[in-house]
Image (cartoon, rainbow, N blue to C red):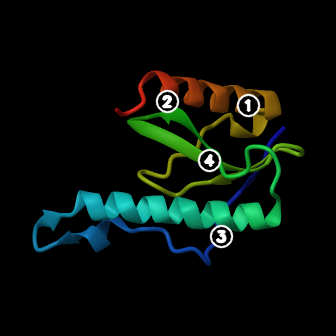
Amino acid sequence: MATIFRAPESITVPSFSTFYKDGNYDREAHDNAEKQYLADLKAMLVRRNNGKNVGEVVQFPHADSYAEYMVASMRPLELVHLPLGDAWDYPYIERLNASDIQGKIDQKKALEKIFKKM
């Protein structure tokens, strides 16, 4: 069973409204800010525990987008909810175990390998 944590408030979550100015949305700047947020959170988690898969992001389809979580620990399974996009929660996240999360990570890496950018 997974333990789910809220993202730390010490790392500022990029806000959509910050990148929407004068009727224009700067998607590239927003994407870069989200990437930086994920990198900062990963660095914090790795300082805490440099174990297997720490910092990996897993996604679960939900509603019109995804529920996203970052691995904080595999044993015991600890995940950090990522408040990005619509910030959906996966309704069964607490029921998952380490092998479920490992399967999602392996699936993601296999898809990235098949569809890698050239």
Q: State the residue lying farthest toward the front.
A: 118
In front: mark 3 or mark 1?
1
Identify the amino acid type marked 4. Answer: Tyr
Pick whichever, 103 or 18, lies toward us: 103
Residue 29 screen position, x and y as percent: 29, 65
Q: Is there a contact, CB below 8 Å, between mark 3 and mark 2? A: no
Which numbered disc, 3 or 1, marks the residue that appears first in the sequence? 3
Residue 74 screen position, x and y as percent: 82, 43
- Residue of label 4: 69
Pick whichever, 76 or 95, lies toward us: 76
- Residue of label 2: 112
Query: Which quadrant: the N terminus?
Result: top right
In front: mark 4 or mark 1?
1
For label 3, count other residues whose C-alpha is less than 10 Å away and answer few (under 14), some (14-19) or many (20+).
few
In front: mark 2 or mark 4?
2
Q: Quick check: 55 above or below 47?
A: above
Q: Is there a contact, CB below 8 Å, between mark 2 and mark 1? A: no
**How far apart in space, not on screen, are marks 2 and 4 (Cα)?**
18 Å
Identify the amino acid type marked 1. Answer: Gln
> Which residue is at 41% across, 25% downward?
115
Q: Secondary structure at mark 4?
A: strand
Residue 57 lies in quadrant: top right
Q: Secondary structure at mark 3?
A: loop
Q: Secondary structure at mark 2?
A: helix
**How far apart in space, not on screen, are marks 3 and 2 (Cα)?**
28 Å
> Which residue is at 41% across, 38% downward?
65
Which numbered disc, 2 or 4, marks the residue that appears first in the sequence? 4
**How far apart in space, not on screen, are marks 4 and 1 (Cα)?**
13 Å
- Residue of label 1: 102
